[in-house]
Image: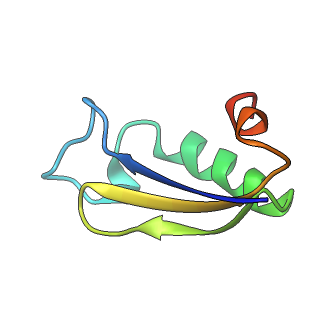
Amino acid sequence: MFLAHLSHTGPQWDVARPMEEQTEWPAHASYMDMLVDEGIIVLGGPLDDMRVVLAMEVESEEAVRVI
């Protein structure tokens, strides 16, 4: 099953800083790389400065909640 997820930046997002300079960026990037390496995230990235979309291959919507 493929699921698409659209999310928005959170309250810590600083619009004056690029993505790679945001709070906790190294930890976030590492986690996302792990999800790609495990084949969970098959496609994803920013749509604009405030939104991101992810396409995931999972068994169910519930499975995404435990990742």
Q: Residue at x 67, y 45 (%)?
A: 31
Q: Residue at x 78, y 56 (%)?
A: 40
User: Which quadrant of the figure has residue 2?
Assistant: bottom right
Count of numbered tags? 0
User: Does residue 9 sit above or below 33 in this rendering?
Assistant: above
Q: Residue at x 80, y 52 (%)?
A: 58
In the displayed structure, does residue 11 sit left or right of residue 66? left
Q: Please identify the quadrant where the N terminus is shown.
A: bottom right
Q: x%, y% of residue 15?
A: 15, 50
In the displayed structure, does residue 45 sit left or right of residue 55? left
Q: x%, y% of residue 30?
A: 66, 49
Q: How are the colours assigned in the image? A: rainbow
Q: x%, y% of residue 49?
A: 23, 62
User: Does residue 56 sit above or below 28 in this rendering?
Assistant: below
- The residue lying furthest to the left in this view is 16
User: Which quadrant of the figure has residue 14?
Assistant: top left
User: Does residue 46 sit above or below 7 in this rendering?
Assistant: below
Give whichever of 56, 50 is nearer the camera. Answer: 56
Give whichever of 10, 59 is nearer the camera. Answer: 59
Q: Residue at x 74, y 35 (%)?
A: 67
